[in-house]
Amino acid sequence: MIEARAHWIQADRYAGDAGSGHEIVMDAGPDKAANSPMELVLIALCGCTASDVAGILRKKREPFTSLEVRASGERAETFPKVYTSIRLTYLVGGKVTHKAMEDAVRLSKEKYCSVSAMLEKSATIDFTIEYV
């Protein structure tokens, strides 16, 4: 079981931590002194799928030299303002074959990435791959 908590700091700022013991600050208000909880959801998606893709590429012995995942999301107009569509952009460096990269991204999306699986309950997630 994973446990997490958030405690109020001031205004709309909260500090959160989980079993790993690392703390993160969030700002749910207009001041934007830190990432909002919904921004952190996209960051979590990027981290989850990037980890999957890097692991798959390593297993396939694909010589990637860099990997970055970017996300942009559209939210519903009414509450709860869930993500309704998300676009992921994978930027990969090195001599990675297009097939290997597409396979790795699809495996992450369809099998391994827990964050993606949860978000797909309310959002369509599509992707592009760019070579840098």
Image (spheres, rainbow, N blue to C red):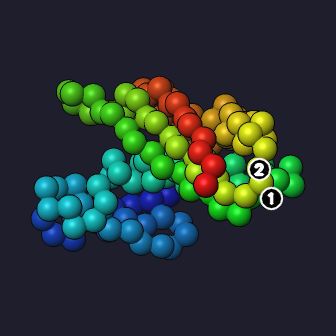
- Amino acid identity at mark 1: Pro
User: Is 115 situated left or right of 11 in this image?
Assistant: right
User: Is 11 situated left or right of 107 in this image?
Assistant: left
- State yes or no: discs 1 and 2 in contact (Cβ < 8 Å): yes
Q: Residue at x 86, y 49 (%)?
A: 60
Q: What residue is pinned by disc 1?
A: 63
**Closer to the camera, 29 or 128?**
128
User: Is 14 situated left or right of 56 in this image?
Assistant: left
Q: Residue at x 77, y 54 (%)?
A: 95
How far from the left and from the top, in percent, is residue 20?
Answer: 55, 69
Q: Residue at x 58, y 51 (%)?
A: 91
Secondary structure under the numbered disc 1 in the rendered image: loop
- Count neighbours of disc 1 (C-alpha within 10 A) and say few if under 14, some if 14 to 19, many if 20 or more: few
Tell me, for residue 85, which label it has, or none.
none
How far from the left and from the top, in percent, is residue 79?
Answer: 22, 30
Q: What residue is pinned by disc 2?
A: 96
How far from the left and from the top, in percent, is residue 117?
Answer: 57, 34
**Closer to the camera, 17 or 95?**
95
